[in-house]
Amino acid sequence: MVGKMNRRTTFYNESFTVDSGGGSSGTITEQWQAWAQIDNRTGNTYAAQATELTQYDYRVKVRFDGRFNSQTTMVYEGQVCKMGSMEVETEGYKNYLILRYQKTDTWLDLS
């Protein structure tokens, strides 16, 4: 299993503050890198019972880490991705997290 975790990605958590003008700004509170198994999926939008739903773009498997939460952002190959869902997977005594991320329109220059 660990041999499939061959992608080193950056994750970060941020907090938001409201300024005097009513706007908000984000500040990165913690940032780290982790080895992950990333399966590329095609994200698309579909309708189910009159509700528009979006499927995820990436399925990410990482070792369990308490820093991950539902707002954790991932930067993968320069593209910022937002978390859609998170679940714990137990395989014997090792715990893993299965994270599903959607791509955003934001890119970071990694050069």
Image (cartoon, rainbow, N blue to C red):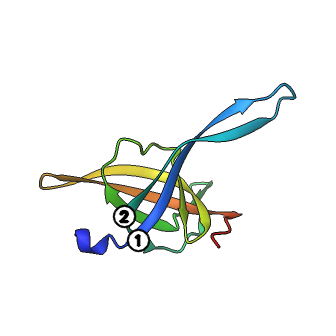
Outermost right residue: 21
Q: Nearer the viewer, residue 78 or 47?
A: 78
x and y percentages locating residue 97 in the rendered image = 33, 53
Reading the image, the residue beneath label 2 is: 35
Q: Residues within 10 Å of mark 2 (few under 14, many from 20)?
A: some
Q: Is residue 104 left or right of residue 77?
A: right
What residue is shown at x 51% (from left), y 63% (from top)?
56
Disc number for residue 7: 1
CB atoms of marks 1 and 2 within 8 Å: yes
As drawn, 29 above or below 94: above
Q: Evaluate whether residue 46 shows in this view.
A: no
- Amino acid type indicated by mark 1: Arg
Q: Position of residue 108 (x, y in %)?
A: 67, 65
On the image, the x and y values in percent for residue 85 come to 45, 51
CA gap between label 1 and label 2 equals 5 Å
**Disc nearer the start of the sequence (1/2):** 1
